[in-house]
Image: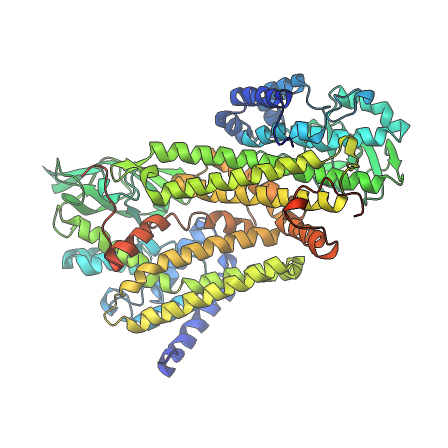
Amino acid sequence: MKIRFTPEQEAFRAGCASWLQQQMEGPFADIRGIMSQTFRADRRLEWERVLGQARWSVIGWPEKYGGRDASLAEQVIFAEEYARSGAPGRVGHLGTELAGPTILHFGNDLQRERFLRPIAKGEEFWCQGYSEPNAGSDLSNVRTRARLEHGPNGPEWVIDGQKIWTSLAQFADWCFVVCRTEEGTKGPAGISYLLVPMKQKGVTVKPIRQITGDAEFNEVFFDGARTKAEYCVGNPGEGWKVAMGTLAFERGVSTLAQQMTFRNELERIVEAAKSNGAASDPLIRQRMAEAWVGLRIMRYSALRMLSRATTGSLGGEALTYKLHWASWRKKLGELAMDVAGAPGELCVGEGYELADLPYLYLFSRADTIYGGTNQIQRNIVAERALGLPKEARGDR
Amino acid sequence: MQFTFDEDQRLAAQSLRDLLDDLCTGADLRRAAEACDATSFTVACATRRDRIKELGFDAALVPEAQGGLGLRPVDLVLLAEEAGRAALPEPLVETAGVALPLLAALAAIDPRADAVLPAAIGGAGIALRWPDSDLVVGIDTADLVLTAESETSLALYSVDQFEWVARESVDPLRRLTQLRARAVEPITVSRDASIPSLWREARRCAAVFDAAQLIGLADRMNALAVAYSLERKQFGKAIGANQAVKHQLANVQIQIEFARPVVYSAAGSLGGSLSAPTDMDTRWLDARVAHAAIAARDAADLAARTAIQVHGAMGYSWELDLQFYAKRSWALSGLHGGRSAHFRSLHEALMQQRIELGPDQLFGRSLPRGA
């Protein structure tokens, strides 16, 4: 067993680290270390374009679509260095990590030609039209519907319905929408995966404020919204497996490098504890050590999954990953708040602007909920990895 | 052995609960939270504040001889729980439980404090600034401020002797202000030998009443989560039908029910008139207070975490009232050194002061002083 990177990989690491460092110390110093997903949006979008121009945005993609054909290990190395450099969270990640890979794997040539390059270049941004008011954990209960119409612009899907918890929809040019295209169907059958332009009359975006005060996600209303018939990924009515494929990307490679972001967060907490004296509290010290232990476990697990992955996809043990990091980070948030102590109660600026540690605390409340709750994750581990009987439904 | 509340205590709590069910609903809290400035906040809360004053609990712990009701802290503990359950924005607990009794204790040894006590009992607002913090709640409605530079003295000021700056709290309903400039002209300053013990007792009261509020908050959060788990359907059934959800809710209630008697017994151990009770060793008292603070914090913490989880994405949205109760819990949990400080205090009692352990010592009341 070898748990180290090759010299070539280390050279690759040095290359991306130095580019990222230049950017974060130079032209983008103003957005370095920002935790909020929406703060300084204009500059964040500009950063996406710079990443795209330098071909650092989607390095795992084929060169012809703006990537570098990078291996899985290189992708993780880049993501680690990205986090280490203090570069801000990717406003473009719904395109680069979800829409792009989905179109790459499940789309056709026409769709690849149309959509991949603008994502890679940071020219078009995406959002994810999955959850609905009555379809959260039970995603296949979606009610948003689309019908094919033959109008003056040729055949088009006409979409009606509502999505909710749609992250970054306010910046998005496109949305991948999971919707019902066959009337009278229930569950996974009859669902299609449509690519829908956001900047049109039939689409309304209404921000939802979170407990952090931030409004990263939104309600999205489709009211006769239109998209070309050819922008359906996979066959009409067979979108469920495409939708599940997207989730596999969401829960897969892109999360392996998160530990570097988490490491930065733990470091901030340790620094704060040293400077305000909390580090002398034995209870706090123990929790900091426990956090470090959890972080190393994540690191080794990520490396193990990476070593076993041969084809660009991950094995069954990857199903455990979300549960682990989400639970770990939620505890990290609690540690952050306890380290901050009573002054952590104070906002630092007008309009509910929170300091880093309280923000981390409040934001991390969501970790065990979004992208599949811990309860759903446990069902996935139990049912898919262990082969236990499926949880009984109430309706069918 | 009497480990239950009497009729008067229950009725008092019920009267506050009825009032708050009416005037401190989620919608009321939201209106107050969305008030853009101190004035509109005060307007949004005016009716409730007046009605609470009418109930006359402010002077509950002030001795009868000084014009109060002469009740003991244990008489107020259920009221504090109700204030918590409603995430009451007004500092009822802080005033009735700590500030006014402290002023009354000062008045008993200081004539100038005695001169303003009737006004304070009559409804003049009184705020308390702890010597180790510059943050104060309830300045908007205060006329008087009790404070000190250290716990060897106690001073009373008119509120306009200080310069205050409003600070936004994580809890949008906690009206925090920070002390900017200090006053020069106190109404009175006392350095009486009894002052340090008054501060100690005031801290014990604050810890126990905060704990009681946390119990109320935990109970409310779990009630909200239970209600939502019945209403929210996924996979064709209420989410509360899943063991993964219902067991979490049961665990929270178990933790609350095991924290309650701890908080009640701590309240029952506190003496009236801010004096340490004569029939109890103070080492035991401190251990009980610390235990109550820890048990209540842990219950509220688990309740908040579970309620958010059960509400799913709704749970971390601003539009859900749950955030008011969760954020109040977090704010209260960090006060007075937080959980760690109470653990230190327990550790001190157990390891350094070597209080007696064992079932026969469980309530410690029979211990002679200094035993």
Which quadrant of the figure contains the N terminus of chain B?
A: top right
Residue B133 visible, this orientation: no
In this picture the colour scheme is rainbow
Residue farthest to the front, as pictured: B360
Q: Quadrant of residue A228?
A: top left
Residue under the point 67% across and 43% down: B288
Quadrant housing residue B135:
top right
The reply, left or right, for residue A321 in relation to residue A347 is left
Name the spot of residue B291 as percent of width and height, x first.
63, 45
Asked if A322 appears above or below A163 in the picture, the reply is below
Position of residue A380 in the picture relative to residue B276 (left or right)? left
Q: Report x, y in % for residue B351.
A: 70, 57
Does residue B131 appear to the left or right of A57 in the view shown? right
Q: Is residue A148 left or right of residue A58?
A: left
A243 or A61, which is in the foreground? A243
- Nearest the eye: A131 or A157: A131
The residue sitting at the bottom extreme is: A7
Residue A279 percent coordinates (x, y): 63, 61
